[in-house]
Each structure stands twice: as C-alpha cells, then as structure tokens.
C-alpha cells in the first residue's frame, strides 16, 4: 500500500482474533484515510467495522499488523493517540450525573483546558450544535437526537485530528438522522477528518467521499460511491420474484434478454444487471411466461451500494 503525506489514518495488515483465535474479527486490513475526508466503513453487523474502530482508537489491541493515527503508532503510544482523536460510540456514554453544559465543560478540563478556556469552548459548542436551549438540562431529559449531537460536540471540543463515529445514526428517527447529517456536512466543509461506520447505504452514499465495503472482517472494495456503483457495469437492476427453479429462470433470462450483463440470485429473488432498459420489464415477463414461470413481483432501479454489496458477496446487506 502506497503511503501519502496526507494520510491521517493508515493500517497495514491489521488483524484481530478473539477467543484463542477462533473468531477472526478483522482480517489483514489495509487502509488509508486522507486528511479532510469523510471515509466510511460500510457493511452488515458483524463485518468487523466496530472492531476496526476499536483498534484505531486504542480500545482494542490488535493481534497483528500496524495502525497509525496522525502518524502515531496506536499500539506503541496509545495515550498520545487518545489526545489526537474524538470518538462517538454507538451507545450513549454521556455522564448522566452532569448537565448538557457540564458534559462539555468537564471534557475540556480533562483535555487540559483551564477553566475559562473550557467554559468558552463549551458555550461555543452549545451554539454550534444547537444545544444552547437545553444547556442546563440533565442529559437523561434530552432526546436521542440531541444526545447524539452532544456526543459529537463533546468529541470535538478538544479539536481532534480525527473524529470517529461508530454507527452514528443507529436508533435515531429520520428527522434526527437528517439533522446529524447536516452537522457532519458542516464539519466536512470545515476540513474535519471523519471516519464513520454504518450499515445504512443511503448514509454512506450521502456523506462519504470514499468508502470501504466490509464483510467478515475483510475489505472487499474501496472507492468513491460513484465509482463503486459504476463498477457494476449496468444501467439498471431488474429484480424478479417467481416460484419454481430460479437458477434455471436466471439462465433463460440471461440468454434471451438483450443487454443483460450479469444475473445473481439472492434468496428468492433474481437480479438482472442490464445495459439499457428500454422495454425490459415487458420482455422479462414475456420470456418468463413463455418458459412457464409466473412472475409474482418485478421492479427496476438504478445500481446502488446494495447492488455492489450483492455483487461482491452474493447476498444482501444484512442487519
């Protein structure tokens, strides 16, 4: 893997095994995240995303390989790395004994700010993250979306080189999710480097400059969302459901439908990757009926990151 001067995160064959080697959570991961980009790890639960973040944030000790954050070895100098990063965990880990304002203030003090600096930084963050109206509230009394914004505000208070977000919108309602996306776009515009994990395709598509698709501890592909979708080599994806021998039906459709570049079966659905889509749905139905199949459901969409995942793994992106 080539090293660039603006690589803020770098992993070389990073590996983690659990339970005496029985579980390979992360498998020889090579990765580089550039300064100022939002980089996403996209994959299902159990793909190794959280373990990867755990190693990069010094919470999990690697079994093998190397990892560097801002040029610092995360294993050799974990205390220094912790001062250079901000972390937002999946779970709400705010101090429940403190108010919204106090969670920010004491975080600043912990990172070496004097009383005045911490107070000023806390007040600025309250405004920036739309928390000022609830500054004096107990954190147990604020909404889930507001709590997540407070976690992000707290993680950024000491101006870290990298912000790590592990499934940042999991469990949030759609309005809160969009509000957090807006904040992340603002941070990106300010030049903040962000690494996030997600299993939401739309989130990865909307936020990330580049992303890595992960499954079973391995990176399957890294690129921009646009390039990943173009790698499917199809203009449209036709999904077909039908009783009967779907493998045989897929073979028939590939032979008889013009423009089909690839067929895949996932569970009880056939996917046709098609170049061009002019009148393809009636043709599919006609060919299937002539072969003795009854189509129970059919749809057509443009390629998505889900399509890319299915192409790479042969299965849908599971929760």
Image (cartoon, rainbow, N blue to C red):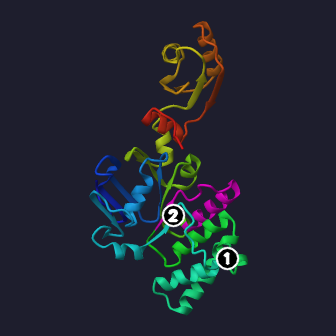
| Pair 2/1: label in front | 1
Q: Position of residue 89 (x, y in %)?
A: 51, 63
In magenta, the rendered stretch is: 163-187
Q: State the mark number for residue 138.
A: 1
Q: In what quadrant of the picture does the C terminus appear?
A: top right
Q: Position of residue 159 (x, y in %)?
A: 49, 77
Residue sitting at 49 percent across and 45 percent down? 44
Helix, strand or loop for disc 2 = loop
Q: Position of residue 286 (x, y in %)?
A: 63, 12
Q: State the mark number for residue 194.
A: none
Helix, strand or loop for disc 1 = loop
Q: Are marks 2 and 1 in contact (CB under 8 Å)?
A: no
Residue sitting at 57 percent across and 72 percent down? 94
Residue sitting at 64 percent across and 24 percent down? 298
In the picture provided, is 80 more to the left or to the right than 193? left
Residue sitting at 35 percent across and 76 percent down? 79
Q: CA distance from mark 2 to mark 1?
A: 20 Å
Taking the view exactly as shown, the residue that stands out farthest to the right is 133
> Disc 2 marks which residue?
89
């Amino acid at each position: 893997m080539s090293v660039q001067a603006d690589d803020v995160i770098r992993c070389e064959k990073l590996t983690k095994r659990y339970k005496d080697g029985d579980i390979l959570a992360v498998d020889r991961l090579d990765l580089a995240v550039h300064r100022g980009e939002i980089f996403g790890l996209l994959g299902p639960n159990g793909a190794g995303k959280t373990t990867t973040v755990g190693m990069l944030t010094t919470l999990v000790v690697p079994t093998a390989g190397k990892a560097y954050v801002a040029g610092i070895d995360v294993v050799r100098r974990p205390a220094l790395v912790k001062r250079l990063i901000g972390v937002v965990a999946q779970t709400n880990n705010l101090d429940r004994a403190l108010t919204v304002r106090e969670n920010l203030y004491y975080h600043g003090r912990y990172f070496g700010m004097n009383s005045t600096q911490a107070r000023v930084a806390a007040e600025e963050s309250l405004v920036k993250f739309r928390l000022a109206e609830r500054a004096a509230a107990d954190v147990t009394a604020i909404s889930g979306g507001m709590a997540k914004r407070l976690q992000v505000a707290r993680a950024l208070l000491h101006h870290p080189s990298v912000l790590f977000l592990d499934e940042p919108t999991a469990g949030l309602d759609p309005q809160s999710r969009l509000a957090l996306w807006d904040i992340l776009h603002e941070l990106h515009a300010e030049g903040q480097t962000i690494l996030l994990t997600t299993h939401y395709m739309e989130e990865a598509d909307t936020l990330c400059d580049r992303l890595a698709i992960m499954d079973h501890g391995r990176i399957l592909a890294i690129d921009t969302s646009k390039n990943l979708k173009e790698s499917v080599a199809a203009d449209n994806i036709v999904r077909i459901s039908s009783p009967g021998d779907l493998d045989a039906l897929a073979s028939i459709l590939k032979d008889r439908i013009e423009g089909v570049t690839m067929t895949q079966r996932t569970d009880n659905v056939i996917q046709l990757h098609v170049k061009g889509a002019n009148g393809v749905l009636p043709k599919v139905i006609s060919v299937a009926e002539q072969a003795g199949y009854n189509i129970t459901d059919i749809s057509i969409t443009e390629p998505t990151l889900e399509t890319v995942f299915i192409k790479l793994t042969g299965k849908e992106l599971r929760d």
